[in-house]
Image (cartoon, helix red, strand yellow):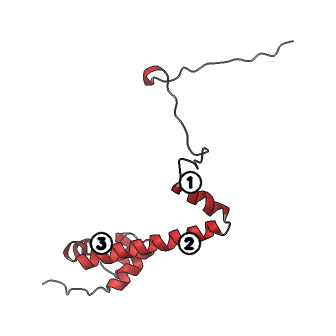
Amino acid sequence: MSRPRIEIDLKRVEALASRGLTNDQIARSLGIHPATLYERKAQFSEFAEAIKNGQSKGITEITNSLYENAKNGNLGAQIFFLTNRDPENWKNTAYNKNEHTGKDGAALPVLNVVFQESG
């Protein structure tokens, strides 16, 4: 005997997705197994659309908030915004580490230098 079909409110699905929850987290919040969520997404386009719309709304809301914070002088928001939106001109060199190699990609030789005091 099969289980009764659980009715799921698509507005709730959209709201959960807008909060940045993963599919598994959405499923658990709805009281269903993640496999059920994936089945519903595959079977019903409106279910998959509710998740996509929710994700888009959440990203839009946070993007707008980040933008407003940057405009209002929040230095952290300004740096984050510029390094992500215009990386060619706003690189954070502290995190851009370059790896150096020797000829043909070989390891660089290690020099052992000994300093001696004179005098």
Give the secondary structure at mark 3.
Answer: helix
Three-letter code, disc 2 = Ser
- Tell me if mark 2 has few (under 14), some (14-19) or many (20+) residues whose alpha carbon lies within 10 angstroms of its own: few
Position of residue 77 relative to residue 87, above or below, is below
Tell me which residue sits at (32%, 86%) in the image.
9
| Residue 101 rendering spot, x and y as whole percentages | 49, 26
Please tell me the numbered disc located at residue 34.
Answer: 3
Q: CA separation, marks 2 and 3?
A: 31 Å
Please tell me the numbered disc located at residue 83.
Answer: 1
Q: Quadrant of residue 75?
A: bottom right
Give the secondary structure at mark 1.
Answer: helix
Labels 1, 3: front one: 1
Three-letter code, disc 3 = Pro
Which sits earlier in the primary sequence, circle 1 or circle 3? 3
Three-letter code, disc 1 = Thr
Q: Quadrant of residue 78?
A: bottom right
Tell me which residue sits at (15%, 83%) in the image.
2
Q: Is residue 25 left or right of residue 110?
A: left
Q: Which residue is mark 2?
A: 65
